[in-house]
């Protein structure tokens, strides 16, 4: 799967990213992949804390160096979507909204990340969403941190250029 380019918009003194992708799986499987700790660990990162409405969570990098982000689940409508406050270490809080819907060919995932200040989020989310697709096609496979990093580095210059145009 090759993901399309995100919509990138100015939003206050930051930016808003929107990805809109269809995955070849059903609604319940995609919901589990984006909300269950064991599934998230297979394609994205290790999460700890409470992943329920009102819960606080932390996300750690794959090498055990500690949390690189945290947040609070602000809204949750299983299996249709959720909203979370997302705060990377050293950054202001942002809002992440994920919505799912059944469509011809699978399930649409719309990911909106609002309030970001860095182009790195565009490359990061694209690389993660590609890893999500790989996970859905091969559920038992573990995440490939080095492969993710290479993909991120390939995507970063193009994303930086798109942000510079705004």
Image (tube, rainbow, N blue to C red):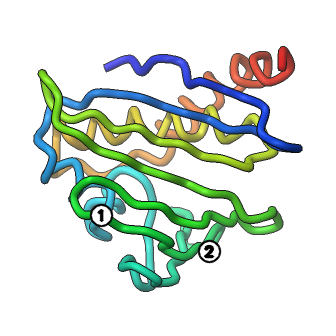
Mark 1 element type: strand
Question: For the residue carrying disc 1, how many other residues have a C-alpha within 10 Å: few (<14), some (14-19), or many (20+)?
Answer: few
Residue 155 x %, y % = 62, 23
Give the residue at mark 2.
67
Q: From the viewer's perspective, is the residue at label 1 or at label 2 nearer?
A: 1
Q: Secondary structure at mark 2?
A: strand
Query: Would residue 148 appear left or right of 107 to someone viewing this image?
Result: right
Residue occupying the point 62% across, 35% down: 17
Q: Quadrant of residue 79?
A: bottom left
Q: For the residue carrying disc 2, how many other residues have a C-alpha within 10 Å: few (<14), some (14-19), or many (20+)?
A: some
Quarter of the picture containing the C terminus is top right
- Residue 68's place in the image compared with 144, above or below, is below
**Residue occupied by mark 1:** 77
Instruction: Give above or below for 106 relative to 114.
Output: above
The residue lying toward the viewer, choosing from 16 and 48, is: 16
Q: How many marks?
A: 2
Earlier-in-chain disc, 1 versus 2: 2
| Residue at the image point whose x is 75% and y is 68% from the top | 89
Left/right of residue 92 with respect to residue 142 in the rendered view? right
């Amino acid at each position: 799967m090759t993901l399309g380019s995100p919509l990138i918009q100015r939003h206050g003194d930051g930016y808003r990213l929107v990805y809109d992708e269809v995955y070849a799986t059903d609604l319940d499987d995609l919901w589990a992949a984006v909300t269950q700790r064991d599934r998230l660990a297979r394609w994205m990162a290790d999460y700890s804390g409470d992943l329920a409405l009102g819960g606080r969570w932390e996300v750690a990098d794959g090498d055990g160096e500690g949390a690189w982000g945290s947040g609070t689940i602000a809204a949750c409508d299983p299996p249709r979507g959720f909203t979370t406050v997302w705060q990377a270490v050293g950054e202001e809080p942002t809002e992440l909204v994920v919505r799912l819907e059944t469509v011809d060919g699978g399930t649409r995932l719309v990911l909106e990340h609002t309030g970001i200040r860095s182009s790195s989020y565009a490359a990061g989310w694209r690389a993660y969403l590609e890893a999500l697709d790989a996970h859905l096609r091969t559920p038992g496979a573990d995440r490939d941190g080095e492969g993710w990093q290479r993909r991120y580095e390939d995507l970063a210059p193009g994303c930086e250029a798109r942000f510079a145009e705004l």
